[in-house]
Amino acid sequence: MSGDGASARGVKQVGYFDCPGGGQVVVDGRVAFIAHMKAPHGTTLVDVSDPAKPRQLASIEVPPGTHSHKVRAANGLMLVNREAHGGPPSSPNPPRGLGIYDVSTPSRPREITLWRSGGTGVHRFTFDGRYAYISPEMDGYVGNIMMILDLHDPSRPQEVGRWWMPGQWTAGGETPSWTGRQHRCHHPIRLGNRLYVSYWHGGFVILDVEDLAKPRFVSGLDWSPPFLTPTHTALPVPFPLHGRRVMLVADEDVAKLEPGPPAFLWLVDITHEQRPVPFASFQVDADGKPQPDMTGCHQPCETITGPEIPVAWFARGLRIVDIANPHAPREVGHFLPPVPEGSTRVCSNDVCVDDRGLLYLVDRGRGVHILERA
């Protein structure tokens, strides 16, 4: 559905690309890469040179029982996850892991290799053009762990290092102190010689990766419980705010420990990184009452270009949060798209920004809206 937003302030629609629902959208140059939620739809590559008229270049399909809902692209490479999803696989050995593609010609993506993981596969990851920081399941561990892959030769990805929360390595004799897979790596984000790693109901950890082969624990903080929702993203702000180093932490409004209010966005002081201190938060229209899953916070834009942070807020669409005064984050704009055809409400899952300042907002149900600040 390409009509104007049902509600907007400080944001206007530039274009719309109609496609099956997506889990992530990223833009490299003038190509948008859309990772879809459900098979057979895998990844769609879209020319956004004219954002008012986005044009499909290519698409990749995945087999039943698998989804490929995350994507990154840099240096002519595209990385996509392969994760169990949506019922029984179509074969006894379905692809699970990290797919690596040559997209130097975006209209003709070519698979280079599939790096295979164990278990359900790879969930989310980041990529700096050389190293991939991923969250695979591996044999002998409970839940996803953190791993670094070197893609210097993309046809032969090499593991550089790994880290897991003590208790995950059951094959090594460790015993988890939590239930099931509650403590598991969601995804790492690198800034300098640190990885900021969200760990679901295990909170977040900060790792020293001066030596990539030997990631070293610096600190961590787990607030679930008492808070009900898992930690989705730990995102360091790449510039000081009022002389302090700050990290944004987004909890995801799913998998609640019990019914409760929607998840929200935290601000954490990491000036003294051995002692991270939450000091502020941002919420949208919260009255403290329980709400259905996928009402509240999900994912901030991971490319921070200034104090205004675009955040995909599930049923509340896109929210622009100004953190210039970090003790009092405030909303300065929003865009709530129309409910997509076939859905009962909006479910904004991811947002990214390109080098023109355009925003790309993907819905889990259908479509990508291309937006700009008004």
Image (cartoon, rainbow, N blue to C red):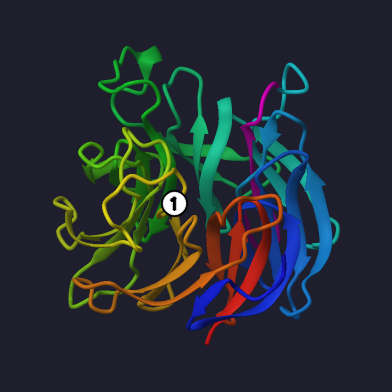
Q: Is residue 260 left or right of residue 104?
A: left
| The quarter of the displayed image where residue 32 is located | bottom right
Relative placement, left or right, of 46 versus 193 is: right
80 in magenta: yes
Crowdedness of circle 1 by 10 Å Cα count: few (<14), some, many (20+)?
many
Asked if residue 215 is positioned above or below residue 17 in the image, the reply reads above
Main SS class of the magenta portion in the image: strand
Q: Position of residue 13 (x, y in %)?
A: 63, 78
* Helix, strand or loop at mark 1: loop
In the depicted structure, whether residue 19 falls above or below residue 318: above
Q: How many marks?
A: 1
Residue at image point 74% right, 38% down: 39
Which quadrant is home to the N terminus? bottom right
Q: Which is more toward the observer, 109 or 200?
A: 200
Query: In the picture shown, does residue 69 fall above or below 141?
Result: below
- Which residue is at a point 72% across and 70% down the rendered structure image? 2
Residue bounds of the magenta highlight: 72-88
x then y, percent, for residue 218: 22, 46
- Picture quadrant where residue 130 is located: bottom right
Residue sitting at the far bottom: 374
Q: In this rendering, does residue 211 appear at all?
A: no
Could you say where residue 198 lies in the image, as x and y percent from the top left?
Answer: 36, 45
On the rendered structure, is 128 left or right of 324?
Answer: right
153 inside magenta stretch? no
- Kindly identify which residue carries mark 1: 295
Q: Nearer the viewer, residue 304 or 52?
A: 52
Name which residue lies at 29% across and 44% down: 205
Circle 1: residue type: Thr
Is residue 228 at least partly visible in the picture? yes
